[in-house]
Amino acid sequence: ALVSMRELLDHAAEHGYGIPAFNVNNLEQVQAVMAAADEVGAPVILQASAGARKYAGESFIKYLVQAAVEAYPHIPVCMHQDHGQSPAVCEGAIRLGFSSVMMDGSLMEDGKTPASYEYNVDVTRRVVEMAHRVGVSVEGELGCLGSLETGMAGEEDGHGAAGKLDHSALLTDPEQAAEFVRATQVDALAIAIGTSHGAYKFTRPPTGDVLAIGRVKEIHARIPNTHLVMHGSSSVPQELLAVINQYGGKMKETYGVPVKEIQEAIRHGVRKINIDTDIRLAMTGAVRKFLHENPDKFDAREWLKPAREAAKQVCKQRYLEFGCEGMG
Ligand code: G3H
Ligand code: 13P
Ligand code: NA
Ligand code: ZN
């Protein structure tokens, strides 16, 4: 059944686990997430960015998720708008049937320029008022995603802030987080701790100076009843990069967020963990490998099948690692 995010995250908090929120934009990704969740008994958060809604089309996104709910009636599914850039975008998502929306007021409507605290509170509070009237949950974001190594957002990602960001903007302030949650009444809060979107997060395996799990603990200590969200949380497994590069890809050396660090964050209030890139890497590697080994094949189903299977494996692994088994 379609459920709100609040319902899922309250349960996760009560039982001390975290839920991976997977970005989807096509049939095979939705099938992969659902099949993985079904195998381990996990609850599901399917999230669509504005780009995903544009790619698939509004009706296709809506009915892909509806199909997932119908095909797996025993699994609770939250349909979440990822990075809503304005109250209007969130309103559109709610009208389309999303059970949860993110109002990302950390950036202006262009999705690049860092916004003022006052702007963020204003747009987020307006979305909460509108959403809560119809039982829809809201995720807000305080602080800007971006690398503490370089001050830049993820290289290949269109959502990053323009130019260099101030170090303090890249780390959510615990006191301001408490004030923000009080003023907006959000159901969940995305925080900035040095992660960024895309494959190029860290130039070496991250240490505490560039991936501030300590900051999660400080924020959780200040607002223990707020569900925290980690964006940019793909782990960028070296094995997946290796498959891509072995079969003709050209990805540079890069490191993601280690699962161990996410597990530590889950012990300190993180309940929703956003993952898109790992699925992209898994699918791309699988397609490259299949087509390399089967140069005579041309039925799209034949290469989409291993791609879907590879995505499913990643999803299943994260469900198990984040403690979702049997929680759905
Ligand atoms: O917000 C970042 C997600 O990875 C979605 O990316 O806008 O390319 O769909 P996208
Ligand atoms: P990744 O690029 O690390 O998968 O992050 C996805 C995300 O935060 C979507 O909102
Ligand atoms: Na989100
Ligand atoms: Zn994100």
Image: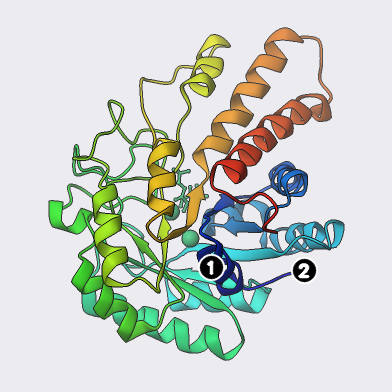
| Residue 268 falls in image quadrant | bottom left
Q: Nearer the viewer, mark 2 or mark 1?
A: 1
| Residue 174 falls in image quadrant | bottom left
> Residue 69 location, x and y as percent?
79, 62
231 w.r.t. 320: above or below: below
Q: Secondary structure at mark 2?
A: loop
11 or 157, which is in the foreground? Answer: 11
- What colouring style does the render use? rainbow
Seen at 82% across and 24% down, the residue is 302
Q: How far apart are labels 2 and 1 at the CA level?
A: 21 Å
143 or 189, which is in the foreground? Answer: 189
Q: Is 275 positioned to the left or the right of 185 in the image?
A: right
> Residue 70 location, x and y as percent?
85, 62
Q: Which amino acid type corresponds to the residue marked 1 in the rendered image? A: Glu
Seen at 72% across and 70% down, the residue is 2
- CB under 8 Å between callouts 2 and 1? no
Label 1: how many residues lie within 10 Å, few (<14), some (14-19) or many (20+)? few
> Residue 324 location, x and y as percent?
62, 51
Q: Which amino acid type corresponds to the residue marked 2 in the rendered image? A: Ala
Residue hosting label 2 = 1
> Residue 271 location, x and y as percent?
48, 60
Quarter placement of the N terminus: bottom right
Label 2: how many residues lie within 10 Å, few (<14), some (14-19) or many (20+)? some
Residue found at the far front of this picture: 15
Q: Secondary structure at mark 1?
A: helix
* Residue 107 in view (yes/no): no
Quarter placement of the C terminus: bottom right
Residue hosting label 1 = 14
Seen at 67% across and 23% down, the residue is 287
* Residue 189 in view (yes/no): yes
309 or 262, which is in the foreground? Answer: 262
